[in-house]
Image (cartoon, helix red, strand yellow):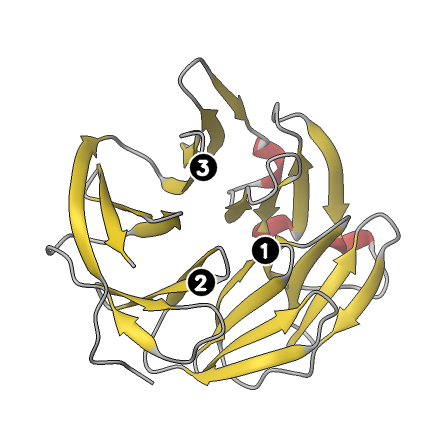
Amino acid sequence: MLSQETIETTFIKKTNIKFDQLISIDNFETTYYTYNNVFFKKNNSNTISYTNLQLGAIYSVNPFNPLKINLFYKDFNTVVILDNRLAEIFRIDFNNIQPYKNISKITTGHDNTTWLFNQDTQQLELFDYKTNATRAKGLPIKSAILDLKSNYNHCFLLTKNYLYTYNYFGSLISKIKNSGYTSIMENNENIILKKQNKLFYLEKNSKIIKPITMQKVLINQFFVVNESLYIYGNESLQEFQLKI
């Protein structure tokens, strides 16, 4: 349900910078991004990087757990897990796992797990990569998969028809109709949704979606850290404060 109440924003600053993908900025102002198919982690003191040209293009990165950063190489159906120094600590090659899994989306789970969407079965799975076993599996999804995000407690699956929320046991706990949203970000159990070039706010345990009002900017990537909203587009990073 879309609310008439809005979330106001205050412009903080704009920084000119160029990324391929801006992944995240954490509470310590560490920036995670990709450029020329290299994954970077940059803070005030240094910049480190990871590259693996043998696996093709980096499709997605999830640094929610900075000790177990997930890089998904979709063309090779492979996930690489890095530590906080960007050293490879584990590799999941789904081509060599039986039964075979054709993965279209992945995100971080708790413990030694990843959430993944199996394109062949059209099911969300919680996969334990240490034992190569599926701990939980959802019912088949009948609409196109748009986005997948998670934290330690929940997984959020956006499809063309619905936004689904699952707990860490893999049980479906909520389902909200999708009214044209195409991507999501999670922050402290709250969800930011993108629709065309506008953003919306869904508070934890609520089904009321509130528009976020802000100056007109191109939104290529976006995310929230506490009450700071970051938007990347046109080779510039803009920061806003959310008045929640």
> Nearer the viewer's eye, disc 2 or disc 1?
2
Quadrant in the rendering for residue 42: top left
The percent coordinates of residue 233 (x first, y second) are 23, 46
Q: Going 40% across and 17% down the picture, which residue do you hit?
A: 44
Can you tell which mark lies on residue 244? none
Dot 3 crowding, Cα within 10 Å, few <14, some 14–19, many 20+: some
Q: Earlier in the sequence, mark 3 or mark 2?
A: 3
Q: CA distance from mark 1 to mark 3?
A: 14 Å
- Which residue is at 66% across, 53% downward? 77
Q: Secondary structure at mark 3?
A: loop
Q: Give the spatial CA distance, label 3 vs label 2.
A: 16 Å
Q: Callout 2 environment at 10 Å: few (<14), some (14 to 19), or many (20+)?
A: some
Q: CA distance from mark 2 to mark 1?
A: 11 Å
Residue holding disc 2: 190
- The residue type indicated by label 3 comes to Asp
Image mark for residue 151: 1
* Residue, disc 3: 26
In the rendered image, the quadrant that contains the C terminus is bottom left
Q: What amino acid is labelled 2 in the image?
A: Asn
